[in-house]
Image (cartoon, grey):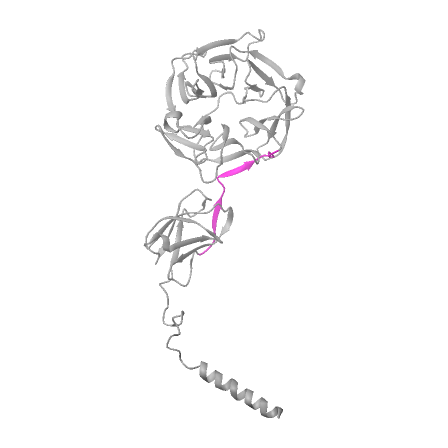
Amino acid sequence: MKNTLYIIQIISIGLLLIIFSCEDPNYPNDIWDEEDKGNTTPIVSGVLPEDGAFAGIDTIIISGQHFSDTLSENLVYFNSMLGNVVNGTSTALSVVPPNLISDSVTIKVAVQGAFVFGKLDGLYQLTAAVQEYGPFDQFTDIYSLDLDLSENLYVSMDGSPNAEFWMVSSDGDSSVWSGALAKGSGMKIGPTGSIYFVNYQRYIYKDEQGTPKENTEIFKRLNGNATDLDFDANGNLFVGGSGSVIDVVNIYDDGGITSGVTEVKDLGDLDVINLRVYGDHVYILTSNTLSERVIYRLPILDTAGTLGDLEVVYNWSVNIIDATALCFTITSSGDLFIGSDSETDPLVLVKNGVASGFYSSVLVPPISYMAWGNAEFLYLINKTDETNRVQKIDTRMNGAGYYGRP
């Protein structure tokens, strides 16, 4: 009996297989087309620049064959990350690589309809144009910075219980350089290696290496509250701030706290936010009673630091209305870098009166203070809710020379 049931089950299964194996006229066609060989496989023959690029910033050119003239049909991978294809033809693709820092990047091109990637022979290098510099983080409160001729970085810190100056040597080692009576809203390394700094008050302070807080020198009393300062080629130290005046200070004068200080310009209702000397002019970023931000310059008329009339260099508040300019500096060719709290372009480069975002894909706001090193590196302070940090930027252009550095 059991054998009979077993035979019946086998026969039933066989019949079902025969029934369902019959062709159903309503059954869809196979997705896979055995005859479809795909579009021609792309070929990657080279990349410019050949020696590498800045990650997330530069546009590289990938040359080859069998790319698509339809931009969206081309995908370029850097290792496993997608680049941004901004232009293309069947033989060349313009691509902004992702923010991937590596000296061993595999570049592959996928084209819609082609079943196989095109691949660059060899590896490519993507480097960082912007680097975090020094031991600074959310627990360090940083305000201003400057560099000496050996590219040692000095940073004003406001800590508890003491303000301090830290030094980050050119090889990256950091240490406390001195104590300080106050944080520095602006600072400069002087000709003898001293740090001169101001802190929104009517004084210039002076520190030497190893100075404890209580020995910080109240160096000179000014004619107005001071925010920033800079030296000219004659050794004059120009100082400006919310006091609406610019003073010139003779740092070699030893006649007392009020001696050697001369008011050289009454700015009326203008307050100085940031001050830089370039060539034979003093440049100032200003704010007025309407909080409008404008960069002016004033000619230096003689070796004593006498200043001429104001001339508008760039009217930030007219040209850029959705952000506040916080600091600026100048390139060796006279162009302006302006840092701000802009969410889209926290750093802009102004050439011939026209501003354009600089490294906007990798920088975040706000940029509150900047200083050049001795070549193409620009150092800036970026204070966010998450961290307070110094960033070192390879700008690929030289900064204006800073006078007074030892």
Q: Quadrant of the C terminus?
A: top right
Question: Is residue 191 placed above or below 362 in the rendered structure?
Answer: above
Q: Is residue 233 left or right of residue 7?
A: left
Between 381 and 21, which is closer to the camera in this rendering? Answer: 21
Q: Position of residue 61 (x, y in %)?
A: 38, 48
Question: Is residue 277 placed above or below 135 in the rendered structure?
Answer: above
- Quadrant of the rendered image containing residue 300: top left
* Region of the chain picked out in magenta, as a range: 121-138
- Quadrant of the rendered image containing residue 154: top right
Question: Is residue 122 placed above or below 348 in the rendered structure?
Answer: below
Residue at image position (42%, 60%) is: 117
Q: Is residue 46 left or right of residue 372?
A: left
Residue 89 can be seen, yes or no: yes
282 within the magenta span: no
Residue at image position (53%, 38%) is: 131
Q: Is residue 174 left or right of residue 352?
A: right
Residue at image position (56%, 11%) is: 220
Q: Position of residue 139 (x, y in %)?
A: 62, 33
Q: Position of residue 55 (x, y in %)?
A: 47, 44
The number of discs equals: 0
Residue 372 can be seen, yes or no: no
Q: Quadrant of the N terminus?
A: bottom right
127 within the magenta span: yes
Residue at image position (58%, 90%) is: 5
Between 294 and 219, which is closer to the camera in this rendering? Answer: 294
Q: Position of residue 318 (x, y in %)?
A: 37, 25
